[in-house]
Structure formats: structure tokens, C-alpha cells
Image (spheres, rainbow, N blue to C red):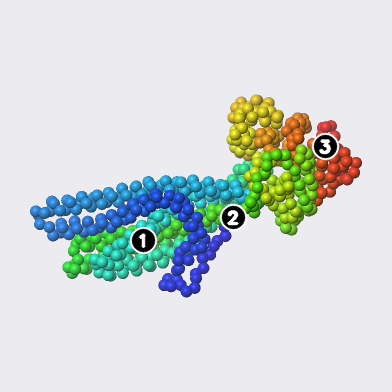
Amino acid sequence: MAEIAEKPTEGAVGTGLRLGRLLGERDLRVLASVLPFLLEFRFRVAISVTLLLVSTGTSLLVPWLLKLIVDHLDTAQMGSVLTVPIALLLAYGFARFGITVFGELRNALFGTVTVRAMRRVSLKVLAHLHGLDLEYHLSRRTGGVSRDLDRGVNGITELMRILVFSIFPTLLQIGGITIILLANYDGAYAAIVGVAAVVYIAFTLRVTEWRTQFIRRSNDANSRANTRAIDSLINYETVKYFGNEALEQDAYDQDLAEWERWRARNRYSLAFLNCGQALFVTVGMLAMMILAARQVVSGDMTLGDLVLINAFSMQVFAPLNALGGVYRQLKRALTDVERMVDILDRRSQVVDAANALPLEHCDARIEFDRVDFAYHAERPILRDVSFVVEPGQKVALVGPSGAGKSTVARLLYRFYDVDGGAVSINGHDVRELKQDSLRAGIGVVPQDAVLFNDTLMHNLRYGRPDATDEDVREAAALAHLDEFIAGLPAGYDTTVGERGLKLSGGEKQRIAIARAILKQPAFMLFDEATSSLDSNTEQAILAALAEVAENRTTVVIAHRLSTVQDADLIIVLDEGAVRERGTHDELLAREGLYAELWAIQQRGGEVEHAA
């Protein structure tokens, strides 16, 4: 993420720091994202805040009890030494014990809020990512997103804790002590507290704003390093094919070196900040104690007042010192969360219309009407593409690589919206249909079948989660997987590895076919469904697919023309436009592009057969 420079605003007052520098627009946006999780547990938060107020009040009572004890022991006669001081000591002990009890009760109650917030925000982000369009997922970096989300979820919890139990009670305690000092002692004490607090806070804000850039840059380097590591592990086989382990490790180490450099700057700047804060705290406490000691010597204050002033000075400056650390934590948490908020703020380019209709689960009529589409404006993919797939028909899309065949499938599935024209199903523009019902009605067998790192049974049942074991076995048999699975020691409980890497390409594709069969969709879409199969298995699966697709609308995207000879209609695409259309025999008789492709593949098939 690019560094965000915080520029000073004009018309600054005093130190020149405004609330806008304390919490910028991005920070306020992040904080606004936290509020819904606090408001979900209003009752628990209210009780926690009440316990906080009681704990703070009790902490202000402790110095007064200590003052009374000291004053009584300083002036008491021997006869009363064993009575009043013991009662005061007991009250003092109970008060200190009460601070701990109220604090623990508060933490226990609020713990549920923070854990539930982590659960809610994690689910919200995952649901949001699932709702984003394909373009986002094609351009994202998995490792970086994973690290950003991990930091963001933890940052949400940290923000809730800081806002409720750090900043608020600290300000409350400083305000309460200042009022007590003004009401009972020389105004100089309150003035010392006020001046020290203003200087301390101004210094903390200025230095922390300067340090924030180091946190952002270290986070950025950390995300890049994590992305590099995840990518190299996902593509383990490719790394091994080219012997590029050292290349990947060097690139990973470069990102880590940058992360280390910014972390070092962060630590050095933190040391400077801590030393400066300690200086202001020490000067403030020293000034209060010198003034109190002089007044005790002059007889204007008792020894107990000196003890009380000392206790109050520690209660003011210790949390004030902690407040500096809290503000650093706040800025770090805000920085950690802002990337996650950026993800949540991203809107999908493909959304349901306000009055979207569900797709009826019945045989479908598919129509492409003068469709234009480009992933990028400067490079058109489809140009004026029109064709109709009647209910029950099998229509094949063929053509050279890059002709736009798979793009047709993506538009039909509405991963993208067309730039011109319309894609319709049963007379409804797909932009008028609910995406979930549209996709529920399409059974897809993709060219590259990616599996979950789980069992074969889980991956097969993914086509219809409520399917019985018998349904799964029937689908596996239709996809000619039953013999393969029977030969595995763990059978259906065999784990396939990440992205199905433990299986061959053909085995993965047969699982994809079985899932599509199990889904029992309204119509079928095969995108190079048999591209990873040997000829014998291909013929067996084509027979199974023909049985599944019988009397069902089917769109087949194919590279091997031999697999679509029986299609009712073959659409030949070239450079994004429809070049030819007709049956297999009609297209061969036309001696055009299809016939040329057929001849090339036939010659390749003869060579393969001879080999």
C-alpha cells in the first residue's frame, strides 16, 4: 500500500495539531466499521462501562483512604491507634481488592463481545469476498489478502478494547483527579497536570503521526513477503520443474529485508517517543512533589496530603504515560484494519438488480444477441456474437485458441456483464436474474478442475451437499471414477491434497464431471470437459455425458472437434466473431475454417495413433 502522507492543516492552534490529525478521514472510516459490533452487544457493553466507572471511582477513593490513615497515625494518641487506623486499613484493602474484582468482571463480560466481533467480522469479510466479481479474484494476491485479513480481524478486537477500556477510563481518571485537586488544593497542582498533559499529548501525536509511515511500510513489505511464500508453495511443482528454489527464496528474503528495515526504524522511533514521554512525566511529577513538600514544610498541608498528592500524581502520569502507548496501539490497529476496510469497501461490478427474478429450474433457451465484450477496452474479445441454443439442443463452440470460447461461458455464468447486446435465458436477460438461482441452474465442468484439500467424498458431494452417499457413488460411477476409487486404500476418504495435487489431471476432471452430474442442473456447460483424458477414457465419459445431457440444453466448448460431431449446432468462433455455424457435415462441406481445423486434428490423430 502506498504511503499516506499526513499534511498539516492551516489555521492550527497551539501546537498546530487538530483533531483531523489525531484521527484522519481514513481512521474515522475504520472506527465507523467497529461501531456495529459494539452496538450488537449494547447490554454487555453498558454493564462493562458501568463496572469501569465503579472501578475508576474506587481507584480515586484509595488515595483519600491512604491520606486519612497517614494523617491519623501522624496525629493520633496511643489510645486510638488500634481502632480507627485498622478500620481505615480494612477499607483501603477492600477498595484495592474491589478495583481488581471490578476490572476482572469487566474483562470477562467484554471478552464475549470481542470474540463474537472477531467471528462476525471474519464471516462478513469471507462473505464479501465471495460476493466480489471474478475480476477482483483474478487480480488479487492470495497470500497478501490472507495476511491483511488476519491483521484486520485482530485489529478490530484491539480497537474495541482500546476505545472502551483504555482511552475512555484514562481521560476519565485524569479529569476526575484534576477536579479533586482544583476543589481541595492549590490551583497550581491542576495547572501542572494540565500543562504536562497538553505537552505530553502534543508530543505523542506529532511523533506517532511521523511513525505511522513506518508501520504502513512494514505491513506492506510483510504482505508482499507472505504473498511470495504462498505463491511459491502453491506452485511447488513449477518451482521444482525449473529448479528455481533459490530464486523464490531470494525474492522472499528481499521482501523480508525491507520489512526488517522498516521495523528497525519503527523501533528506533519508538525509543525516541518513549524517552520523550518519560521526560515530560518525570518533570510533571517532580514539579508536583516539590510544591507539595514545600507546603508540608510551611504547614499549609499535612503529611497525609503529601501522600495523597503523590498518589494522585502517579494516578495521573502513569495512565498518561500509558495513554501514549495506547495511542500508538490505536494507530497501529487502525493501520492494520484499514486494508481490510478497503476490501469491504470494494464493490462488485456484477450485482443483482433491485427487482431480479429467480431462474426457473427447467429446460432453458439460451440466446446471445449481438454481444460485445472486452476485459480491457483496448482489447475487444467478443464482437457482435449472436446465436441461439434451443431447449434440449446440444450446441458446441469451437475455434482456435484465443477466439473467445471460454469468455462465452463466463458471460453465460455472469462472471462478467456484457458491454453491448444481451445474454438471455428463457427470454430473460441474465442481468435481470438472481445470480444464485442462475448459477444453481447451470452444471459446469471446467477445463481446469480445482479441488479442495479434503476427501474425495467431500469434493464429490460439493456438487450437491445434501446428496446421500449412494447418490455420490452413482455419480462417480457415471464419471468412471468407481474403479479408481475402489483401488485406493482409503477409498472415498482419501485426501486429494491442496488443489487436488495428489491426483492426475484426468482424475480431477472426472471428479468435476461427477460433481456436475450430482448437481442435476437445468442445463449443462462443458468447458473443455475431456481435455485431460486419454482417448479410451474420453470415449467412455462422452457416452456418460451424452446420457446426462440427453433431452437437456447443453453448451459444449471444445478444442477436440471429434468430441462434438454429434452436436445439433456448431458455432465456429475466430478472433471474437462468429465465422461459421452449422452441423459437423455441413461445416465440412463448406470447406472453411472448421474443415481446416478438422483436417489438422485428423492428421494429429493419425500421428498419435501410429505412435
Q: Which of disc 1 and disc 3 is earlier in sequence?
A: 1
Q: Residues within 10 Å of mark 1 (few under 14, many from 20)?
A: some
- Percent across and percent down for residue 65 are 22, 56
The secondary element bearing badge 1 is classed as helix
CA–CA distance between discs 2 and 3?
45 Å
- Percent across and percent down for residue 582 are 85, 43
**Residue that mark 2 sits on:** 346
Q: Residues within 10 Å of mark 3 (few under 14, many from 20)?
A: some
Q: Which of disc 2 and disc 1 is earlier in sequence?
A: 1
CA–CA distance between discs 1 and 2?
36 Å
The secondary element bearing badge 2 is classed as loop
Q: Quadrant of the N terminus?
A: bottom right
Residue type for callout 1 = Leu
- Viewer can see residue 365: yes
* Res 406 label: none
**Residue that mark 1 sits on:** 171
Residue depth check, mark 3 versus mark 1: number of the one nearer the observer: 3
- Viewer can see residue 290: no
Q: Quadrant of the C terminus?
A: top right
Which residue sits furthest bottom?
11
**Residue that mark 3 sits on:** 565
The secondary element bearing badge 3 is classed as loop
